[in-house]
Image (cartoon, rainbow, N blue to C red):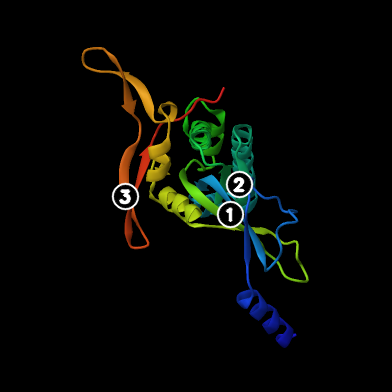
Amino acid sequence: MKIEIEEQIKKIIESSFEIEEIEEVPELDDERLVFGSKGLSFEATVVYVVLRGTNQILNKHSEITLAKIRIAYFCLIAEIVNPLGGVVRQAHDDGVYIFFQGKNQDTLNSAVKAAMKIKYMLGNDYSRVKKLFESYDAVNFAIGIDDGTVLCVKLGSLQSPLGGLVWSGEVLNIAMEIANKLEAPNHIGVSELVHYNLTDAVKYNKGRDKQGNEKLIEIWRSASFDYNEMEQTYYSTSFFWTVT
């Protein structure tokens, strides 16, 4: 067994690896994904939603309660993002990645609108969801957004070729880093690239100047964080998009 494992690992590490560029988010049963030798690459706006304080929830309540809260978070997110073109493809204990495949402003706007709708459901007093989660101390969340290339590969082995899918790319890391920097009430943060390409609908709010004239007011505020020993600019907001 030792020799077989060593040979298999050697083959994975040293053999050539093909990357095919596609225009959709892969499914688990995508036949183009070949374990150990081929991955699929696509452009997407990545939304990372993280639930914080799960250890405190577990300590105060129970593992069953925490499991139900995680399931409820996942359900809420999926129900909001799917009609807007978002696809939930990866979830771990405390966070969910959502992919909005595409390269245009519509994709970016849809991703940010989805984040703002999630913010409304989790953080607005008019939402019954917020009140429900508050009773379990489960309203500490953050949403980071970036745009770029995502690589998908199949996880498993020769004996278990249909394992899960693994998603990687700098865009996922930056979305997570931005989320980690956010604090209430600024639950949503976007990279400089995303902010630059947003349209007015999700970039400004209507207001009035001192003379009473209507004007557009920037709803995002800039800040920075260190990533790979370089300073990165991101923008955060407390605004939400009402869910009717």
Mark 2 — residue?
70
What is the quadrant of residue 88 in the picture? top right
Q: Is residue 186 visible?
A: no
Task: Please say if the residues under marks 2 and 1 sit with CB atoms less than 8 Å apart.
Answer: yes
Q: Quadrant of the C terminus?
A: top right
Question: How far apart, in angstroms, are the residues tagged by discs 2 and 3?
Answer: 30 Å
Q: Which mark is residue 78?
A: none
Kindly state the secondary structure of the residue where label 3 is placed: strand
Mark 3 — residue?
224
Q: Is residue 222 left or right of residue 153?
A: left
Q: Is residue 45 left or right of residue 229?
A: right
Across and down, in percent, residue 93 comes to 58, 54
Q: Residue at x 49, y 49 (%)?
A: 148
Q: Earlier in the sequence, mark 2 or mark 3?
A: 2
Q: Nearer the viewer, residue 149 or 67?
A: 149
Question: How far apart, in angstroms, are the residues tagged by discs 1 and 3?
Answer: 27 Å
Question: How far apart, in angstroms, are the residues tagged by discs 2 and 1?
Answer: 8 Å
Kindly state the secondary structure of the residue where label 2 is placed: helix
Across and down, in percent, residue 144 comes to 46, 45
Across and down, in percent, residue 187 comes to 42, 40
Which class describes the residues within 10 Å of circle 3: few (<14), some (14-19), or many (20+)?
some
Establish if 101 lies above or below 154. above
Which class describes the residues within 10 Å of circle 1: few (<14), some (14-19), or many (20+)?
few
Mark 1 — residue?
93
Q: Residue at x 59, y 33 (%)?
A: 84
Q: Nearer the viewer, residue 20 or 114?
A: 20
Closer mark to the observer between disc 1 and disc 3: 3
Q: Amino acid at mark 1?
A: Asp
Q: Is residue 56 visible?
A: yes
Q: Amino acid at mark 2?
A: Arg
